[in-house]
């Protein structure tokens, strides 16, 4: 199958219309959102949703998010109104917040992977909403990467993974946030299953109290049940091995430099992903700049594309960790998963 790339440019409606033709016929379309690129299909059509799992090589017990163009469209997908839904939607939609609540009858099993809940979000991207509106159905979409790889934040990343597997990519340029949406469950005490650009602090300001799922910063223990099925799988991993060191800039740089030198002696090709604060301490070792620790949102937006870039240059990616306040939590969640939790805290 030939994969066509359609530039969104300044006509998101035309891009949405081109994508909707394929969606209505049961096909797959990759499209930009403000978080990462999604791989979309008609979310009310089970066999169309199955094609997403096939194209990504995704385990079919991992449920998908339904994307809507209007707030009101979310309520058809849930069995009743979730607690706090109105205030959360008014505050954060359109935007990078996914809400989970009990599903309604129109949601196919393929979307929820057999769970009794469904995840819904309204993306803050004109081409995405034009695609959903023109399709006339909610769009089921995971991130548009091969299962296990870093999520795509540019159309070229989608093409790297999906060339020949899907008919169309809508190219809307680089994604603003570069990490996937915050996933919040509303079936009990509001609980963050996956952190994102809508932070715990922002949610607490609206809800009062928010819990964090256990597995956000640590691997699931033996016998522990994943709050979100996606959390049990290997994730965001480039081919290179990723190692993380968390500490003050100078100490982290000294430890990462020692690891770098050891890997070099062993004949491996290491590369360092550094913050601005630690950059002066790496000497002439090969370093890529992630950004400043003062701005974890920018670190988030660069992480996945940097992992893909460094994968071409390195066998080992040595990366600094940061604190978990604000969007630091989303950064550390993705980084630790891409490292398979190989991390040292100094
Ligand atoms: O920003 C995003 O959320 C992107 C864009 C395309 O919207 N989508 C995305 O989808 O990241 P995906 O499939 O890569 O991640 C969805 C996550 C998975 O970890 C999945 O297990 C979880 O949400 N999830 C979906 N439905 C769920 C449910 N009913 N209960 C618990 N977790 C659920
Ligand atoms: Mg994903």
Image (cartoon, rainbow, N blue to C red):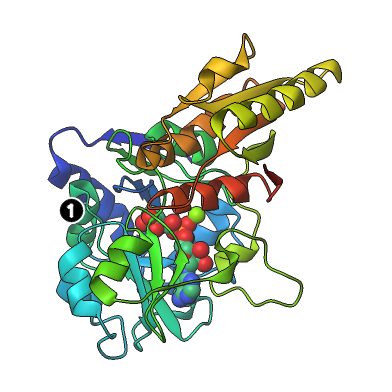
Image position of 168 with respect to 147: above or below: above
Location of residue 207 in the rendering, given as x and y in whole percent from the top left corner: 28, 76
Q: Who's the residue at 29% across and 76% down the image? A: 208
Q: Quadrant of residue 310?
A: top right
Q: Quadrant of residue 183?
A: bottom left
Image position of 60 with respect to 332: above or below: below
* Residue 139 at least partly seen: no
Question: Quick one: which residue is furthest to the top in this view?
Answer: 284
Q: Who's the residue at 58% across and 35% down the image? A: 320
Nearest to the observer: residue 346 or residue 336: 346
Question: Quick one: which residue is furthest to the right in this view?
Answer: 266
Nearest to the observer: residue 204 or residue 146: 204
Q: Answer with left or right where residue 115 lies relative to residue 189.
A: right
Location of residue 288 in the rendering, given as x and y in whole percent from the top left corner: 53, 21
Please, what secondary structure does the residue beneath circle 1 have?
A: helix
| Image quarter hosting the C terminus | top right
Q: Within 10 angstroms of label 1, few (less than 14), some, or many (20 or more) residues?
A: many
* Residue 34 at least partly seen: yes
Location of residue 53 in the rendering, given as x and y in whole percent from the top left corner: 54, 60
Q: Answer with left or right where residue 83 lies relative to residue 45.
A: left
Image position of 238 with respect to 253: above or below: below
Location of residue 180 in the rendering, given as x and y in whole percent from the top left corner: 41, 53
Q: Who's the residue at 30% across and 80% down the image? A: 77
Question: Does the beta carbon of the residue at mark 1 sit less than 8 Å from ligand 1?
Answer: no
Residue that numbered label 1 is attached to:
130
Q: How many marks?
A: 1
Nearest to the observer: residue 33 or residue 272: 272
Q: Answer with left or right where residue 18 lies relative to residue 100.
A: left
């Amino acid at each position: 199958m030939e994969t066509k790339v359609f530039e969104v440019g300044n006509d998101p409606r035309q891009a949405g219309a081109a994508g909707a033709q394929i969606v209505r016929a049961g096909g797959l379309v990759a499209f930009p959102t403000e978080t990462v690129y999604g791989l979309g299909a008609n979310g009310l059509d089970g066999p169309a949703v199955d094609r997403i799992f096939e194209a990504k090589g995704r385990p079919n017990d991992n449920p998908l998010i339904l994307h809507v163009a209007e707030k009101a469209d979310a309520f058809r997908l849930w069995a009743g109104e979730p607690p706090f839904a109105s205030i959360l939607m008014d505050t954060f939609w359109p935007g990078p917040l996914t809400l989970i609540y009990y599903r309604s009858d129109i949601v196919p099993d393929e979307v929820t992977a057999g769970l009794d809940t469904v995840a819904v979000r309204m993306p803050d991207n004109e081409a995405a909403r034009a695609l959903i509106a023109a399709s006339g159905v909610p769009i089921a979409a995971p991130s548009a990467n091969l299962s296990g790889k870093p999520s795509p934040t540019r159309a070229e990343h989608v093409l790297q993974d999906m060339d020949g597997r899907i008919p169309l990519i809508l190219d809307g340029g680089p994604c603003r946030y570069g990490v996937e949406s915050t996933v919040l469950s509303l079936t009990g005490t509001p609980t963050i299953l996956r952190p994102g650009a809508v932070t715990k602090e922002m949610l607490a300001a609206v809800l009062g109290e928010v819990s964090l799922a256990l597995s956000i910063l640590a691997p699931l223990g033996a016998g522990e049940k994943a709050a979100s099925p996606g959390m049990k799988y290997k994730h965001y991993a480039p081919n290179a091995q990723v190692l993380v060191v968390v500490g003050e800039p100078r100490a982290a740089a000294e430890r990462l430099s020692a690891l770098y030198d050891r890997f070099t002696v062993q004949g491996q090709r290491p590369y360092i992903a550094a913050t601005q604060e630690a950059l002066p301490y790496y000497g002439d070792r090969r370093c890529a700049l992630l950004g400043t620790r003062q701005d974890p949102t920018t670190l988030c937006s660069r992480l996945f594309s940097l992992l893909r870039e460094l994968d071409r240059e390195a066998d080992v990616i040595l990366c600094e960790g940061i604190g978990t306040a604000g969007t630091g939590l989303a950064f550390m969640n993705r980084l630790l998963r891409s490292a398979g939790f190989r991390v040292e805290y100094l």
